[in-house]
Image (tube, coloured by chain):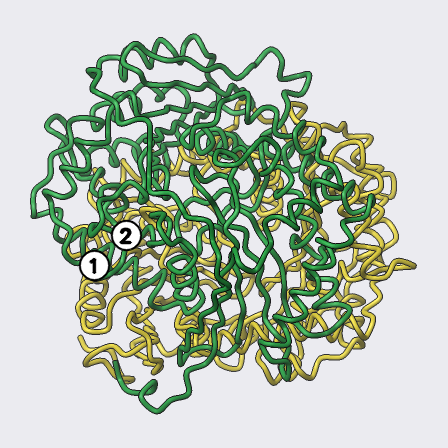
Chain colours: A yellow, B green
């Protein structure tokens, strides 16, 4: 049992707080022989190579009637490619201890690879095969679809999923961001191999591809490896535009009835774009309110003082075309209303008064100091470099980050607190919370 | 861990850390050897140098866990773990956490059957600070009902979240309770709810005084520090804590030889996907004879790890009777442990059919053994995982800490890859024959409760 577990598994990749291996880490810009760009960190202590990459075009590209197509594609990429059927492909990976993973978010398709240095060429070749010649054989597709459907059925009674799905669909109705990447039982059942091929054709291209490599490898060798995996992809993707969106239904509470002893709560409102000049101030203020440490206001008020929940937290989530602040907790049905009252009160108090100078100073120290901890393994560094590239923060971002944090004043923090938390909340509750029903949030 | 998967907490937690074990020192690590010291008060210190980033992972492992609780006080080891954050005579509640946060550190703690561990991850120059705080709370904890009672609500909410809201976790609790006839491993680490509700401040303080002492603790430091500097810091902090009488050796009630095939069925209205889980009583590294746990480790991989495994290929790919299937083995326990196989049937397939198909896969390994290819592939993967483990100082600290807290030595951990390499096909087959016998097992079925009362409001 750990002492603290985030109450909700947030479905989205967020920028982990942290940084500062600054002094110890040099990022090189690599251009492969075929002209593909990547960032490289050389790390010779362990004989491995970690690759992380992203294609623009995630589940937002799904036809709403076939939601889950991108997600199912990610599931299917290691189920056979080129001349290798599913069994042979999996055996090849394991014989060389090559680890491949694929995942899909709203905006991006992401992948990672980890290999022992000795096997790196074969590893990148196998990745290339998966990206360019996936087979999508009928038997493998039905098997994997069956697994997805089983998972979707299981989630129909899982309060975490119900609260989260309800929040996103109410916040972004009729928008791709309102749909979960996994799709639904109905849409998952409709997807064909042709849909997966169509997704691959439209998304896996060189023009909006972000690549990061960390490992015991130099720039020249890294460039050659990149070409092994990516050079023969199409030059350009073919994406459907995603319109900008703001969260709706703020000021509303939605209760989903499910017979569980503990109700799961999600809450959130409009967030802040990654490129907004106030982003860093918002990041700090949110850390003070409900970031993941044992010192946040929500943690103190909900858990430490009142014992209302095991976990409570919130975080900033940003997409290319929308941004939200999103949080959650889980608490017994007869005290859910109390927990929500405390959360709403703390959010209001933060909006009205902002943080104190002492809280601001402590939060800045934490956010600066803890960055190194998010950069302590090759895979974590590679993932972070991809995120920095996707967010277009510049190759010197890690060096600049401390000064961006230091520049936030108490006046900035108070102003941004009002902007971030003054706009109203959408709350979803899955369970049997006593005295709470769907309707407007009470003042 | 001497072994592969690390179980950090009870029930569902065996699934927690999927990576593998530590490794032989690679050539470039020879200058940075892992060192092991014992202070004069009995505290053990293990230093794992890793100079890639200017951070350290500092962990303290107490050789006490849920299996050491007095009957009737289930959940107490874990409750005390929570209460360890509530302040001491010198540092009031919250100060330690605040200091850790201010220096950009991360912290947490976890409890298992055999150990309770606390850790901080901080910039290297702050190592002494956290060591001093941790040494202080080894004997300075002060508790009042003002903090104890709300925290008891917190662990009850944790139990809600981990178990009551989760049918699969509920099934796991029932299987453990049925599998372990005499060992305290049969009760959940989080505790039985009716006993958790009655835990008091005095229970916690009594447990603390009995078990938290330097000679019952192992400090593991992984990261940007050299061993002599770490030793000096440990002497200046932990070294000042007075020696107390030790609780070792740890003797718990042992299991009688299992004789009956057992099965149970849990019906829950929220179950949309029926599942089957079977746990066999098997030896761990510490409780078994030489080589037994290594063979079980390889057997678990061949039988149930990933897409190439016997269970997955037979039940999911070839026979189309399951949507998922696999196996895992917890070799890290102090006493007799468990080997688990699981699966979920495809729609239209009954649990009985799935069980029969699972039995056939296991029988085939026991009767015919494993192929040279799958043996080689599994060993390669297991040993490579150990190399990958070197990429994470936090993982290294956890593996050594968990292994040593269960009584293994640094050398046992370092030689894990050698032992895996030495496992023969015959030993894998023998392990299946000897240990995967149904009389050693409990099979649990999770089904949907469709009775009218199940839909009554709770």
In this view, the residue in front, B30 or A207, is B30
CB-based contact (under 8 Å), mark 2 and mark 1: yes
Place of residue A351 in the rendered image (x, y in percent of width and height, measured from the top left): 24, 59
Query: Picture coordinates of residue B82 (x, y %)?
Result: 24, 44
Q: Mark 1 points at which residue?
A: A346
User: x and y percent of residue B313 in the render?
Assistant: 74, 62
Horizontally, residue B414 falls left or right of residue B121, namely right
Name the secondary structure under disc 2. helix
Q: Confirm whether residue A398 shows in the render.
A: no
* Residue occupying the point 25% across, 59% down: A309
Q: Residue A434: which quarter of the image?
A: bottom left
For the residue labelled by badge 1, is the local secondary structure a helix, a strand or a loop? Answer: helix
Tag 2 residue: A289
Identify which residue, A121 or B34, lies in the foreground.
B34
Vertical order, B404 against A346 (above or below): above
User: Do tags 2 and 1 sit on the same chain?
Assistant: yes
């Amino acid at each position: 049992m750990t002492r603290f577990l985030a109450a909700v598994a947030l479905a989205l990749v967020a920028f982990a707080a942290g940084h500062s291996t600054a002094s110890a880490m040099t990022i090189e810009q690599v251009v492969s022989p075929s002209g593909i760009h990547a960032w490289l960190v050389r790390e010779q202590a362990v004989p491995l190579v970690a690759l992380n990459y992203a294609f623009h075009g995630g589940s937002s590209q799904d036809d709403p009637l076939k939601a889950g197509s991108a997600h199912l594609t990610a599931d299917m990429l290691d189920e056979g490619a080129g001349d290798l059927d599913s069994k042979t492909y999996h055996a090849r990976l394991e014989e060389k201890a090559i680890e491949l993973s694929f995942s899909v978010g709203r905006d991006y398709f992401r992948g990672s690879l980890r290999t022992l240095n000795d096997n790196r060429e074969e590893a990148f070749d196998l990745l290339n095969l998966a990206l360019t010649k996936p087979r999508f054989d009928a038997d493998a597709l039905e098997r994997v679809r069956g697994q997805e459907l089983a998972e979707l059925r299981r989630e129909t009674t899982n309060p975490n999923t119900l609260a989260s799905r309800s929040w996103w669909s109410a916040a972004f109705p009729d928008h791709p961001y309102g749909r979960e990447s996994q799709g639904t039982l109905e849409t998952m059942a409709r997807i064909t191999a042709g849909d997966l091929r169509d997704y691959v054709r439209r998304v896996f291209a060189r023009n909006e591809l972000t690549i990061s490599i960390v490992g015991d490898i130099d720039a020249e060798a890294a460039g050659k490896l990149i070409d092994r995996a990516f050079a023969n992809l199409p030059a350009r993707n073919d994406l459907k535009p995603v319109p900008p969106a703001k969260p709706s239904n703020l000021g509303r509470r939605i209760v989903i009835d499910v017979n569980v002893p503990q109700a799961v709560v999600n809450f959130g409102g409009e967030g802040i774009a990654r490129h907004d000049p106030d982003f860093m101030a918002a990041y700090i203020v949110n850390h003070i309110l409900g970031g993941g440490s044992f010192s946040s206001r929500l943690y103190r008020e909900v858990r430490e003082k009142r014992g209302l929940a095991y976990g409570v937290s919130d975080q900033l989530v940003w997409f290319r075309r929308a941004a939200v602040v999103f949080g959650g907790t889980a608490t017994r049905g007869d005290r859910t209303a109390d927990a929500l009252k405390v959360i709403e009160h703390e959010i209001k108090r933060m909006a009205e008064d902002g943080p104190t100078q002492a809280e601001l100073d402590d939060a800045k120290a934490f956010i600066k100091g803890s960055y190194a901890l998010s950069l302590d393994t090759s895979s974590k560094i590679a993932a972070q470099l991809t995120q920095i590239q996707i967010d277009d923060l510049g190759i010197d971002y890690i060096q600049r980050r401390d000064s961006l944090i230091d520049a936030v004043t108490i006046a900035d923090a108070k102003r941004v607190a009002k902007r971030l938390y003054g706009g109203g909340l959408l709350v979803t509750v899955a369970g049997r919370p006593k005295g709470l029903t769907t309707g407007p949030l009470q003042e | 861990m001497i072994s592969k998967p690390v179980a950090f907490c009870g029930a569902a937690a065996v699934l927690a850390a999927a990576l593998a074990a530590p490794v032989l020192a690679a050539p470039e690590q020879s200058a940075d050897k892992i060192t092991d010291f014992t202070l004069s008060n009995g505290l053990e210190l293990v230093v794992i140098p890793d100079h890639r980033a200017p951070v350290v992972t500092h962990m303290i492992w107490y050789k006490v866990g849920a299996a050491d609780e007095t009957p009737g006080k289930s959940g107490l080891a874990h409750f005390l773990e929570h209460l360890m954050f509530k302040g001491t005579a010198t540092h009031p509640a919250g100060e330690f956490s605040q200091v850790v946060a201010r220096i950009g550190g991360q912290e947490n703690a976890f409890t298992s059957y055999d150990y309770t561990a606390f850790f901080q991850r901080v910039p290297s120059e702050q190592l002494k600070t956290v060591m001093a705080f941790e040494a202080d709370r080894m004997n300075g904890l002060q508790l009042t009902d003002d903090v104890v009672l709300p925290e008891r609500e917190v662990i009850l909410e944790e139990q809600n979240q981990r178990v009551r809201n989760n049918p699969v976790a509920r099934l796991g609790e029932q299987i453990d309770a049925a599998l372990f006839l005499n060992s305290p491993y049969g009760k959940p680490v989080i505790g039985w709810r009716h006993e958790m509700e009655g835990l008091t401040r005095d229970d916690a303080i009594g447990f603390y005084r009995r078990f938290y002492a330097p000679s019952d603790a192992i400090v593991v430091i992984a990261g940007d520090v050299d061993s002599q500097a770490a030793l000096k810091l440990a002497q200046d902090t932990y070294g000042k804590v007075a020696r107390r009488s030790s609780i070792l050796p740890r003797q718990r009630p042992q299991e009688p030889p299992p004789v009956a095939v057992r099965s149970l069925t849990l019906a829950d209205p929220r179950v949309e996907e029926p599942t089957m889980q079977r746990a066999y009583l098997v030896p761990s590294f510490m409780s078994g004879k030489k080589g037994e746990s290594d063979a079980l480790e390889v057997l678990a991989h061949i039988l149930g790890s990933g897409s190439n495994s016997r269970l997955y290929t037979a039940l999911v790919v070839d026979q189309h009777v399951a949507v998922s299937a696999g196996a895992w083995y917890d070799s890290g326990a102090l006493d007799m442990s468990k080997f688990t196989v699981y699966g979920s049937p495809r729609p239209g397939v009954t649990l009985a059919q799935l069980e029969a198909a699972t039995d056939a896969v296991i029988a085939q390994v026991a009767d015919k053994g494993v192929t040279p290819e799958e043996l080689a592939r599994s060993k390669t993967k297991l040993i490579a995982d150990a190399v990958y483990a070197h990429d994470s100082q936090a993982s290294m600290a956890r593996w050594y800490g968990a292994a040593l807290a269960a009584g293994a030595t640094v050398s046992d951990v370092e030689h894990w890859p050698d032992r895996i390499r030495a496992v023969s096909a015959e030993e894998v087959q023998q392990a299946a024959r000897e240990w995967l016998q149904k009389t050693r097992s409990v099979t649990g079925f999770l089904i949907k409760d469709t009775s009218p009362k199940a839909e009554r409001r709770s």
